Image (cartoon, rainbow, N blue to C red):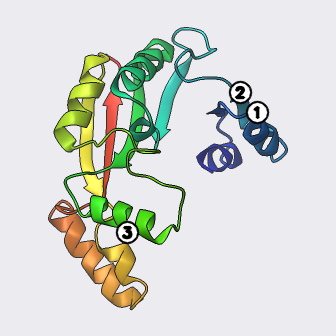
Amino acid sequence: MLTEYLAAKGVESFGLDLNPEAVSFASHRRFAKGPWYVCSSALELSFQDKMFDAACCFEVLEHLYVDQARQVLQEIFRVLRTGGRLAVTTPNYRSPWPILERTLDAMRLVPPLEGVQHVQRFTRRSLFDLVAQAGLQPVSLGRGFGIAPFLSLLSWRLALAVDRAETKVGNPVGNLLAGVWMKP
């Protein structure tokens, strides 16, 4: 987990989950400097204004309806200090991701995604616009996780070569959107 990685590097970090069992499980794996896990809704963060230098929203926004996502982003804006950064990742629905999602659903390899877990279908533009509505300014917005990870099943060399090529051209078929925004 990211929170554990940061704690191992000496960074005080907090993880948030609405499920008390998940919070209890994660809390038993704490390092000296955290991470600290909080059972709370992201719709109403239980933190003081301007408390954090950074926040991460990895694979979260697609699980929220647009009004909920807007509220979460406003809460993140509230708890970020001036100059604080928000990192976001979410599936890119202008990529092969929908095919992957339908395949996983059809094969029942995961609990249903389309329309059940993933209720928002973000593109670069819709993600950019949503985060901007919360008052955050873009630092970078890109795509990643293209074809290369799947090719690693066949050949690491091939996957690394394709990854370099995808990175060079900006991952035009990247299955994930990844962005960083800053609080002005």
Q: Is residue 183 left or right of residue 23?
A: left
> Is residue 133 shown above or below 164?
above
Most foreground residue, 56 or 34: 56
- C-alpha separation, residue under disc 2 versus residue under disc 1: 6 Å
Please give the residue where the numbered disc 3 appears in the rendered image.
103
Mark sitting earlier along the chain (1/3): 1
Discs 2, 1 touching: Cβ within 8 Å: yes
Residue at point 28%, 82% (across, down): 161
Residue 23, x across and y down, in percent? 75, 37
Relative image position of residue 90 (x, y in whole percent):
37, 46
Asked whether residue 137 appears in the rendered view, the answer is: no
Q: Which residue is mark 1?
A: 20
Q: Earlier in the sequence, mark 2 or mark 1?
A: 1
| Tag count | 3
Residue 139 visible in the picture: yes
Q: Amino acid under label 1?
A: Pro
Which secondary structure lies at badge 3?
helix
Q: CA distance from mark 3 to mark 2?
A: 33 Å
